[in-house]
Every structure is written in structure tokens, then in C-alpha cells.
Image: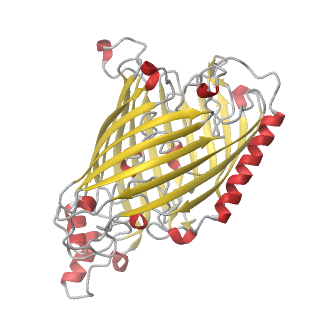
Amino acid sequence: MARLARALLVVFLACNFAVAQRHTAASETPTKLPDAPAPSAEVDQSTDTDDDATPTMFPHWENSRFLIGGQANIIFQAHGPFHSPYQGPNSLLPRGEYKTSLLGTLYLAAQAIRDPKFALDGLFDLESAGGRGDSEALGLAGFTNLDVVRNPNLGSTPYMARAQVHQIIGFTDKMVENARTQFSLASEVPERRLEFHVGKMSLPDFLDINSIGSDSHLQFMNWTVDNNGAWDYAADTRGYTYAIVSEYDDKTWSARYALALMPTVANGIDLDWALRRASGQNWEFELRKPLLGNLLPPARKGTIRILSYVNHAHMGLYRDANKEFLAGIGTRPVIQNVEKFSAVKYGFALNFEQELTEDIRMFGRVGWNEGQHESFAYTEVDQTVEFGGDYSGRRWSRPNDKIGLAFVSNAIKKDHQEYLKLGGLGFLLGDGNLNYAREDILESYYNMHTWRGLYYALDLQFVDHPGYNQDRGPVLVESVRMHVDF
């Protein structure tokens, strides 16, 4: 806790320095919201000077080549006792429990080249993740707090979260407005352009983004609501990897490719640098067109994204682990005993969002992976279906408030089910037995902007068949979140 406090103090002091040094000729023109905003960009950038309408604690530089910012996110989460005739080493505990997680991040960035056609940024983030999740983040495929690090032994010591070079190569002189974020400092960019991000990053910073369901700091909190659960994206246990992301952007569409390092073991902190035997490859196509055609006015924006991925890593087959156990080897199936280098796991995902009215938006995701190889990096989901939406508080004169509602249903394949039924353990799941059913989750939240970048949220998550086990649950998880954008 002391280390986390020191890290957040650094954020606070750095942001005060930003206030003292801010550019005196900052533009008064509001920045256009991106189609898929980065985390903490989901607020109404009102030009009103009233504190209640200011989306950050301190004003930011607008026309400087430098960016200094930060955020702090604290989530208190609890659940009561629930039905459970048995439990295993990786079960959600059936007794009532509560935990608190703390996440603080310092964002630093600078533009080496400011010409919009060839802009070059350097980005660095320092982060501290402390606290715990309920049951040490075990027992649920769709865990209820995305801020939780799945290995609590790592502690809250600050670490380098991101360190990147961002390069833009423009192919036209026509410029369009660009939201200035911690990932891109340019305020305008060429309409047709190529972008590269190289270094340490989290792949969901650039892929599977959804402006309604991607930000656990201002929106939903569940792992499989904010990300596609069937996308076993390359990452260490904190969610980061080293990667190259290339992106081509045109007027109404974008195409992306990412090559990333995989962890050496499932949910491990160490990455395998041998790309010939271990890598995560990702492709995404994005089309920015209204999804309902002429049924809605042209001003109602819509976006659809199609993602595919192929992972090579030291993985095992659930079927091989089951066969080994049924042949009399060991007291339970152990997936680590049958792992092989360069094993291949692949999958597909679809992600969409659509404005329905000035205040109402809907979104959804569908995901599938082959499910025969072990879940390795993100979570234990082989299939997922999700639908939801949000409603702006503009109607009651609170434009930065939001109400959100989402339903997600997750599933695993037959061999994965059998592995858990025989007593096998994944890196998240393992009740010692399994009476299989889909894991269904309903989440709702109210996020309230109270003052200058300070937000509070109430969140409820109803989980039926936790860990795909209809012998256990259901469970209701209550959360209170405080978020500060410095």
C-alpha cells in the first residue's frame, strides 16, 4: 500500500507540474471524439468552464509537443454467500467476501516530429497495480474486475506498462481531426495514412476496441464484457507484451496487423522472445458505416470490426491430458504434462457498435476459438456472445454520466469441459468436478461525474453458473468504483 501511495503521489506531482507549465495559447476548439476512443476518453469534452463539466482534474496542454497525464482507479467489490455443494482449488469462494483493487498510471509522451504527415511520438507509461480480486481472481471465466492482476504475488511495485514509438506516414494532404490521447499526440492526421506502434503495449489498446464496452475505468468492469473473451490475445499476466502494430486508415475503413510475444507458460509474467516457436498474430478489419442503413439518420454512426488471430506457443491439448489421466497416470489430468512447442491455437471475433439516438447506443461481440488447446493468455473462454448498450445522462443535465447494461454468455468446448470434470485445473478454473452449463453474466452500472475528472460508479454483476458449473451459484457481485483522470 505504501508503494502504491508513492506511485500515485508521483502521478499527482507530475500533473501539477503540467498545470504550472501548460501552454498559454491553448486552442479553444473542442476535440472530435474518436470512433473508438482510448481508455478514459469516453467523456463529453464540453467547453463549459464549470468544474462539473471539466473531464480532467487539471487542464492539459493542447498544442504542446509534450503530454503528461495520469489516472487512478479504485474498485471495492463484494459478493455474498451462494450455493456450492463442493469447491476446488480454483473455485470462486462460496462464503461472502470483499476485496479492493487499486490501479495508478502515469502517462508521458513527446513528439519528436510534429509534421502531421510524418509525425513521430515517443510514449512511456508507469503503472502500479495493487490490492486483490475476490477469490484471488479465480473461479470465473468472465471475472468481475478487469483491473485485477491474476498473480497477486507480483505486488504493487511500479513497473513499466508501455514504452512505444508511434510513427505516422501520410499519403494525402487532406487532414482530419484526431483526438489527442496518450497513444497519439497529433491533433490532426492525414485522412489516408499508415501508422506503426512498436514496443511494449497491451493489444486491446489497438484491437477489439469498442467505444461502449472497452473501458473498465468509466464503463463495464467484467473481463468478457470489456474484451472478447474468446480472443486469447498475447500478453503476460498483467496484460502487456512486446509487439508491432501496423494500421492503414482510410476515410471509412481501417486494417490492422499485430505481431506480439507470447508468455512462456500459461498466464505467466515472462515472455518468449523466440518468434520462430512462439508468437501471436492478429488481423483486424474495421468498417465505419451505419449498420442499419436507411433505418436511421445518416448522422448516427456505426462501426463493425472483424478480428482473427493465430497463436503459436508451448501449449497442450485438453484431449491428450484427459487420455493420459484415464490411462492411469496421475491423480488428475495435468495440461502442463502434454505441452508442446509451436502448438497452434486460432480464433475469430466480431465487434460492432451503433448509435440509435442522440443518447442511446448499442454494441455487441461474438467470439470463437478452436478450444482444443489450453487457454493460455487471457481467460478460459472458447465461445462468447455479448449484447448491450449505454444511455447518456444528457437528458437530466449530466452529459458526462452514463448508464450501461450488458449481457454476455460464455462457453467452452467438450474436451475442455471433460478436463475440468475430471479434476483438471486451468489458470483460472477448477472446481474439482463439473456439471457443465454456459456461464451467463448480466452487468449494469451507473457512472457519475462529480467534479473535475472525479467519477464514482455503482456496478452490479449477476453471474449464473460460475466457472461453467450449474452445481454452483448463482452469485451477485456488487462494486463501487472511484476513478480520477488527472
- Tell whether 375 sits left or right of 409: right
Examine the rendered structure and indicate whether residue 363 appears above or below residue 409.
above
Q: Can the viewer see residue 200 in this picture?
A: no
Q: Is residue 273 above or below residue 243?
A: below
Screen quadrant of the N terminus: bottom right
Across and down, in percent, residue 264 comes to 50, 69
| Residue 21 coordinates in the image, percent (x, y) | 83, 35
Q: Nearer the viewer, residue 157 or 461?
A: 461
Q: Is residue 237 shown above or below 335?
A: above
Picture quadrant of residue 327: bottom left
Closer to the camera, 341 or 210? 210
Asked if residue 141 lies left or right of residue 74, the reply is: left
Color style of the picture: secondary structure
The residue depicted at 49 percent of the width and 52 percent of the height is 75
- Give residue 6's position: percent from left, percent from top: 71, 59
Q: Residue at x 21, y 78 (%)?
A: 323
What residue is rendered at 38% in x and 53% in y?
144
Whether residue 341 is visible to the viewer of this picture, yes or no, is yes
Question: Which residue appears at 24% of the width and 75% of the height?
Answer: 432
The quarter of the image holding the C terminus is top right
User: Residue 409, how many percent across, how many down?
Assistant: 26, 48
